[in-house]
Amino acid sequence: MARTALVTGGSRGIGAAISHALKDAGYTVAATYAGNDEAAAKFTEETGIKTYKWNVADYDECTAGIAAVEADLGPIDVLVNNAGITRDAPFHKMTKDQWDQVIGTNLTGVFNMTHPIWPGMRERKFGRVIIISSINGQKGQFAQVNYAASKAGDLGIVKSLAQEGARFGITANAICPGYIATDMVMAVPEKVRESIIAQIPTGRLGEPEEIARCVVFLASDDAGFINGSTISANGGQFFV
Ligand code: CAA
């Protein structure tokens, strides 16, 4: 029977590419989204992938949403924590609300999504937890104290879950995308974006599909010995 994968923020950007790629690889896929009903409806129409609306920053919404997905599609074998937001500002201008929003979605959201799914993975002795972190969680970034902290925190989650899940056949890994051609990166002022591209040895932004292929590999049985790892996919912009 096909395994079931749940992708948060799975109807747009990198998440949409991940949903597509997992479906192409034979998974039954569900995608969550937070707000853009129109994009989600279009995505479902084009791909046949079911979409579910909830806020990953809210634990109760996650619990209820996950139960609905599992009732529709069966137990979740692969969880891709992809949902993420930016609220960029230099630190002296960053508000508490900007901090809370980014930590709530990018870091607490990973807890909220993984915590209700984890016991079932332990019982079934199989699971794949994949977190989409960021190059900026590895190196920090001007105007992203909140985002860099959340994405660095995600790496701590992965390394800890890897140790807890290993004996239950669960792996937890992270991917750190560099700058990928998505709405999030396109929202960066053009001059800043050009200066970023100049720092990428490959000489271009990444494509969402280049991240999706990493996810498909980490989700597979072939990747069973890879646990607690971070794959950097950034065109050579930063080495850990
Ligand atoms: N390094 C050093 N200095 C910088 C800088 C940088 N990267 N960016 C801006 N500055 C400087 C400016 O030149 C300016 O200096 P002066 O005051 O001397 O002119 C100062 O910092 C602050 O400028 P502003 O007061 O104009 O700042 P602002 O409040 O208008 O904020 C900004 C502007 C939010 C920083 C905007 O420039 C921006 O969005 N920058 C991009 C940040 C970024 O790279 N975000 C990544 C988004 S993509 C992503 O997150 C996906 C991923 O995972 C990779």
Image (spheres, rainbow, N blue to C red):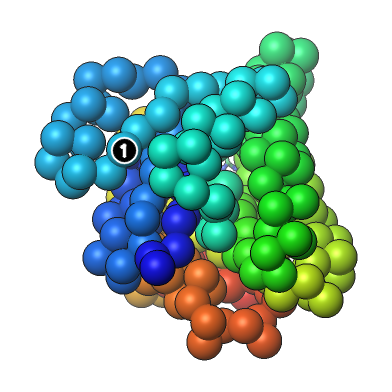
Circle 1: is it few (<14), some (14-19), or many (20+) Cα within 10 Å? many
In the rendered image, which residue does mark 1 sit on?
A: 50
Rendering quarter of residue 45: top left
Which residue occupies 52% across, 41% down?
70
User: Is 9 located above or below residue 163 in the figure?
Assistant: above
In the rendered image, which quarter contains the C terminus?
A: bottom right
User: Is 209 located above or below residue 79 in the figure?
Assistant: below
User: Is 172 located above or below residue 222 in the figure?
Assistant: above
Which residue occupies 70% across, 12% down?
97
> Is 72 displayed left or right of 80 in the figure?
left
In front of the other: 179 or 142: 179
Quadrant field for ligand 1: top right
In the rendered image, which quarter contains the N terminus?
A: bottom left
Q: Is mark 1 within 8 Å of ligand 1?
A: no
Instruction: Answer whether residue 132 is visible to the viewer in this image.
Output: no
Question: Could you say whether the residue bearing mark 1 is in a helix, strand or loop?
Answer: strand
User: Residue 30's x, y, as percent?
Assistant: 40, 44
User: Residue 142's x, y, as percent?
Assistant: 64, 40
Rendering quarter of residue 100: top right
In front of the other: 24 or 175: 24
> Is 175 displayed left or right of 7 in the figure?
right
User: Residue 177's x, y, as percent?
Assistant: 50, 59
Give the residue type at disc 1.
Lys
In front of the other: 201 or 21: 21
